[in-house]
Amino acid sequence: MKKRKMSKVQVIALGFLIIIVAGVLLLKLPFATRSGESTDWLTAIFTATSATCVTGLVVADTYLYWSAFGQIVILCLIQIGGLGFMSIGIFLLVFFRRKVGLSERGLMQESVNALQLGGMVRLVKIIICGTLIVELCGAALLSIRFIPLLGVKTGIYYSIFHAVSAFCNGGFDLMGRFGEYSSLVMFYGDGVVNFAIMALVIIGGLGFLVWQDVLKNGFHVKKYRLHTKIVLMMTVSVLVVTTVLFMIFEWNNTMVDMSFKEKLYASMFSSVTARTAGFNSIDTAALTDSSKLLTILLMFMGGSPGSTAGGIKTTTVVVIFLYLWSNMRNATGCNIFGRRLDDEVIKKASLVFYINIILAVGAALIICSLESMNFIDIIFEVFSAIGTVGMTTGITRDLCAASKLVLVLLMYCGRIGSMTFAMSFIEKRKNVPVKFPVEKITVG
């Protein structure tokens, strides 16, 4: 950083790019595919980016196309991309008893959007140890179904793969064994698989800062930071409301032949995974337009800051709504839970919202000009990519090379953060200390 005079956001952006390049080179190896032939560059780039950016969009079925080696490479990319390379890097420094300097702590703070520089090493320990514990517990639950179905060896492998993919909100699956691009459709009525995957997705999407706060204060909600309260409130509220909406929209469509319990499972699963996990237990292409629109909104929102999830984040949505509500009432400041939000937070939330909208609309215009496909399917794909979700109506593999590259860029921006991506180009520019005269204009 010092030699190249690189900012923190530039280091983070470059770090993820290096990981993607390494993944591409490994996936280009002949023994990474089942056919034993080297894959084409576009497939390798798209898959490596999707895995590192924990998205889940694929141009080739993970089980049918990639060998065991290729699948393990994808799994490693998901794990590194989900935790963030800085978390793993600092953990290795601590493990080998090397000094963790201020620059590393600063990068870690930027990487997880921490509010303060202190306690970064302790936070990293919580992230790594907590991740291993949660993923192992998730794998143990999934093994209850996968071992009887696939045998001990394959069942354990499937359990670990899907536990890591779910916790990191990766969306990659190996269910191509039972049907190409089938995801978890065959388990739509299985309570064990549904709740194990949903629990992993939710825990991974809450954010490492929330973990730290909950571990510190237990069930003493009043002691939680404002950030934690907002995240938990939004997570529960969105889950309940959207579960009900999915059940209403799909009751006589994709869920018409299901029992009430199965409809509840499918609705909850759709609500949870649409917020960046990328799995599906019902046919996404067969959803009603209402459900597709609801899914797009959930994908755009995503999970919470400093988590394995993508999207503009739950806190951003809350801040923007509070800002609108307070201005409509002509109130002073944005207040929630007895606290007032800082003006810088409102400014940042607005930037994140509009940058993501601009990127999504721009990408949709480009893809629409290149493809002759259903408009809502293209919009669905674009928001799935920028939200690092991985849900698709099935058009990913049918897109032309240029459209796929647009999605690659969106996935990359979505993972490092659209604001981080923009700031990596402009952060070093100095503002001229001159203010121009003020003049009013008419708006609205």
Image (tube, rainbow, N blue to C red):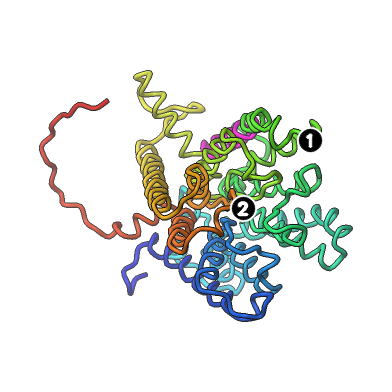
Looking at the image, which is closer to me, 34 or 420? 34
Helix, strand or loop for the magenta stretch, by majority: helix
Q: Which span of residues is magenta-colored?
A: 224-240
Visible residue check, residue 109: no
The answer to whether residue 297 is magenta is no
Q: Which residue is depicted at the point 54% across and 43% down?
A: 299
The C terminus sits in image quarter: top left
**Hey, what amino acid is under mark 2?**
Asn
The N terminus sits in image quarter: bottom left
Looking at the image, which is closer to me, 193 or 64? 64
Marks 1 and 2, how far apart at CA: 27 Å
In what element is the residue under mark 2? loop
Label 1, residues with CA under 10 Å away: few <14, some 14-19, many ≥20: some
The answer to whether residue 237 is magenta is yes
What mark, if any, has residue 258 been given in the picture? 1
Q: How many marks?
A: 2
**Hey, what amino acid is under mark 1?**
Met
Looking at the image, which is closer to me, 114 or 23? 23
Rendered position, 395 above or below 43: above
Rendered position, 1 above or below 261: below
Q: For this view, does 151 lie left or right of residue 163?
A: right
Q: Which residue is depicted at the point 65% across and 33% down?
A: 246
Query: Residue 208: x, y in percent?
Result: 58, 50
Label 2, residues with CA under 10 Å away: few <14, some 14-19, many ≥20: many
Residue extending farthest left: 437
In terms of image quadrants, where is residue 221? top right
Q: For this view, does 408 lie left or right of residue 246?
A: left
Residue extending farthest front: 372
What mark, if any, has residue 382 been given in the picture? none
Q: Residue under label 2, please give it.
A: 169
Query: Residue 369: x, y in percent?
Result: 39, 52
Visible residue check, residue 250: yes
